[in-house]
Amino acid sequence: MRLVLQRVKEASVTVDGQIVGAIGAGYLILLCVMKGDTSLQAQLLAEKIVKLRLFDSVGGKVNDRSLLDVHGEVLVVSQFTLAADIQKGNRPDYTAAAGPEEAKILYEYFMQKLRELDVQKVEGGRFGAAMSVQLTNDGPVTLILEK
């Protein structure tokens, strides 16, 4: 699994002009399920994400509090293009991405694990849809995680 995590003040995802997911302060996660990924990888990434200390303390100490400490929210958007291989030519190769059926199962499982880990609010986009994502980056803080 490969993901891009952005700390946000707010984020939303829209499909056909309608908001299908929206959060306040927390993380926007663009998630790519790769061929061969497992539920264990999804679980481990979810556990890591809720424990990452990317929020400052009330006193201003940098990277002192986790998503759970600040009661942050998470918006997860499926993003198969993170599997792109651009080593040859100019057209990205996405064959490393898992097929839609497998990817959707792990995408939903990942969100369920975040909920089970007591994330206050977990929202998602619409899997497989053309989506518009809006966010107000906080920091900016952006990480790439892979498991």
Image (tube, grey):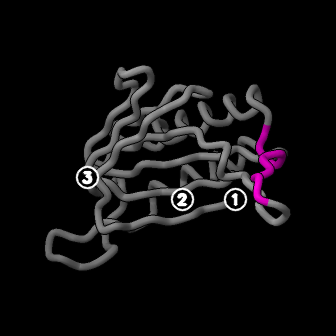
Between the C-alphas of marks 3 and 1, the distance is: 26 Å
Q: Based on the displayed image, in which of its 4 quarters is residue 103 positioned?
A: top right
Give whichever of discs 1 and 2 has the lower sequence position. Answer: 2
Q: Amino acid at mark 3?
A: Lys
Is 16 positioned to the left or the right of 24 in the image?
Answer: right
Instruction: Report which residue position mark 3 lands on.
Output: 9
Front-most of 43 and 81? 81
Task: Tell me the number on the disc at residue 48.
Answer: 2
Q: Based on the displayed image, in which of its 4 quarters is residue 137 positioned?
A: bottom left
Residue at 65% over, 54% down: 2
The region drawn magenta spans 90-98
Secondary structure state at the residue bearing disc 2: helix
* Whether residue 76 is situated above or below residue 84 in the rendered picture: above
Instruction: Report which residue position mark 1 lands on.
Output: 147
Q: Amino acid at mark 1?
A: Lys
Q: Nearer the viewer, mark 1 or mark 2?
A: 1
Front-most of 55 and 97? 97
Residue 12 image offset from top left, x and y in percent: 35, 37
CB under 8 Å between callouts 3 and 1?
no
CB under 8 Å between callouts 1 and 2?
yes
* Whether residue 84 is situated above or below residue 111 in the rendered picture: below
Give whichever of discs 2 and 3 has the lower sequence position. Answer: 3
